[in-house]
Image (cartoon, rainbow, N blue to C red):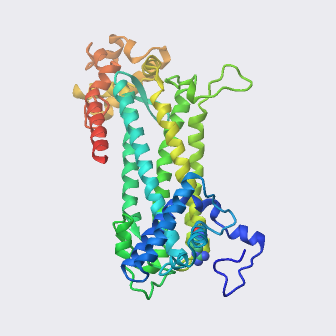
């Protein structure tokens, strides 16, 4: 079939070149945004007297019917069309005749596609934020429900100091709150309308870009028509935010994989979110968490692909930019899927506090508290640190722990040590005395839970 742009050329292209050039396979998902944008365009053309009110009414009705027919399945997307913009215009013209040909006055596919992506992504951002809020709520609920569980905190994956499991989980809630704020921030720069930039240089018609932007729910218009069609920062910003978000999900996934191993056994996942092995009957694998960790690389790849695609492009529009959609759509789809699995996987996860406590009792994680005890009795911290280290070494030699090391032996290291040492280095005491803001005591943790909930409340 001859192309809509036939004129300068015959419009006859090679079949493989046609397939290569086409984007309808992935941009047809923007049909709603494309049609909504076109209806606003028709209204703007009528308002400014570029077309008549009757033409605009005919265009609007034609477009609304196409939208309804697509939604109901009465009309199928034609995969042989070059892109969604051409498809809609072609069907419109087939259905309403010559008036359909007036729609593309004072616009170009360059500003049209930029408009559609912005509209599509701002809808997706709304959904992403809702999913992130659900996850943050589940994290806060998990923290609240399990406030009594003490576990070893780690640095270098070595047992370091005792903490509340809730404290650890809340660290992820903080990350998710930042993800929400990053996406909302990206949304501000995304919600500007490029339509009316036309091919790139603007137009000779007296259009009203602000009116069209307002009809479409944009905060304002892009200020330079060349930038309007060539800017894809809004995609990059979203991809950047999504990459950081995936990094957070990946770190949490890695911990879940560790925690569900026999070596830790801190948590157990619901059967709904695990798989078995085809050969080893005892296996219960955390495949969902592993897949989330794995898909993180894919989202980083989407960001890299887009940055690389854009880096050498001269202004303004270049066909390379058609590649933008596959990256950003893939990232959004992947992140949404990961969130839809992560949230219920967490809400159904069983915590095993006895195993956490057992691990907390074994790793000399109260050695800092022994040193702090000596400091409180008047010893400089560095000397206290040294003595505590020597006592730990002696305990390891004897096969005991600080809690069972005899008082007389303690006193051989320092006369400052009295029998109050045992209550001072008791694991629960160690946790409860870390009362600093943001710390691990149950009081500090409750403040953090309340803070997370307040932030979520503000977001709604
Ligand atoms: N399908 C194209 C894209 O996704 C639409 C814009 C085409 N513009 C052009 N001048 N060929 O980027």
Which quarter is ligand 1 in?
A: bottom right
Task: Tell me the residue at 46%/64% (across/down).
Answer: 36
Task: Tell me the residue at 28%/42% (across/down).
Answer: 457
Task: Tell me the residue at 49%/14% (across/down).
Answer: 399
Quarter location, residue 448: top left
Tell me the quadrant of the picture where the N terminus can be found. bottom right
Residue 66 screen position, x and y as percent: 54, 62
Left or right placement of residue 202 versus residue 435 in this view: right
Q: Is residue 14 above or below residue 148?
A: below
Q: Nearer the viewer, residue 58 or 135?
A: 58
Q: Is residue 321 visible?
A: no
Q: Nearer the viewer, residue 377 or 266?
A: 266
Left or right placement of residue 6 versus residue 101 in this view: right
Q: Is residue 155 above or below residue 427?
A: below
Residue 259 screen position, x and y as percent: 52, 28
Task: Tell me the residue at 49%/24% (across/down).
Answer: 267
Left or right placement of residue 447 versus residue 364 in this view: left
Q: Is residue 215 above or below residue 290?
A: below
Q: Nearer the viewer, residue 216 or 359?
A: 216
């Amino acid at each position: 079939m001859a192309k809509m742009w036939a004129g300068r050329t015959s419009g006859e292209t090679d079949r493989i070149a046609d397939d290569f050039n086409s984007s309808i396979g992935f941009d047809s998902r923007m049909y709603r945004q494309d049609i909504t944008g076109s209806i606003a365009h028709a209204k703007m053309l009528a308002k400014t007297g570029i077309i008549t009110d009757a033409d605009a009414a005919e265009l609007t009705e034609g477009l609304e019917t196409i939208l309804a027919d697509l939604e109901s399945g009465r009309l199928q997307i034609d995969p042989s069309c070059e892109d969604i913009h051409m498809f809609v215009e072609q069907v419109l013209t087939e259905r309403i005749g010559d008036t359909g040909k007036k729609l593309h006055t004072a616009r170009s596919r360059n500003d049209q596609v930029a408009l559609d992506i912005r509209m599509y992504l701002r809808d997706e951002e709304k959904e992403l934020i809702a999913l992130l809020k659900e996850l943050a709520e589940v994290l806060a609920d998990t923290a609240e429900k399990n406030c009594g569980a003490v576990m070893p905190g780690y640095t270098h994956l070595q047992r370091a100091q005792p903490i509340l499991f809730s404290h650890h989980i809340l660290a992820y809630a903080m990350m998710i709150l930042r993800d929400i704020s990053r996406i909302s921030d990206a949304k501000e720069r995304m919600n500007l309308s490029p339509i009316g930039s036309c091919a790139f240089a603007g137009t000779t018609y007296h259009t009203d870009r602000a009116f069209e932007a307002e009809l479409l729910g944009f905060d304002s218009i892009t200020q330079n028509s060349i930038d309007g069609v060539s800017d894809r920062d809004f995609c990059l910003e979203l991809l950047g935010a999504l990459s950081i978000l995936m990094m957070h999900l990946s770190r949490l996934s890695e911990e879940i994989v560790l925690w569900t191993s026999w070596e830790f056994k801190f948590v157990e996942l619901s059967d709904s979110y695990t798989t078995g092995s085809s050969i080893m009957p005892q296996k219960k694998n955390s495949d969902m968490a592993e897949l989330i960790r794995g898909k993180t690389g894919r989202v980083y790849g989407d960001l890299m692909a887009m940055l690389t695609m854009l880096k050498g492009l001269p202004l303004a529009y270049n066909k390379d930019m058609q590649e933008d959609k596959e990256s950003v759509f893939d990232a959004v789809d992947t992140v949404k899927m990961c969130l839809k699995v992560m949230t219920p996987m967490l809400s159904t996860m069983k915590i095993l506090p006895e195993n956490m406590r057992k691990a907390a009792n074994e790793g000399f994680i109260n050695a800092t508290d022994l040193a702090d005890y000596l400091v409180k009795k008047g010893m400089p911290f560095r000397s206290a640190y040294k003595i505590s280290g020597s006592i730990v070494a002696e305990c390891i030699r004897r096969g005991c722990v600080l809690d069972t090391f005899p008082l007389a032996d303690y006193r051989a290291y320092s006369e400052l040590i009295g029998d109050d040492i045992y209550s001072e280095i008791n694991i629960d005491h160690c946790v409860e005395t870390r009362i600093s803001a943001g710390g691990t005591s149950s009081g500090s943790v409750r403040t953090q839970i309340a803070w997370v909930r307040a932030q979520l409340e503000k977001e709604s």
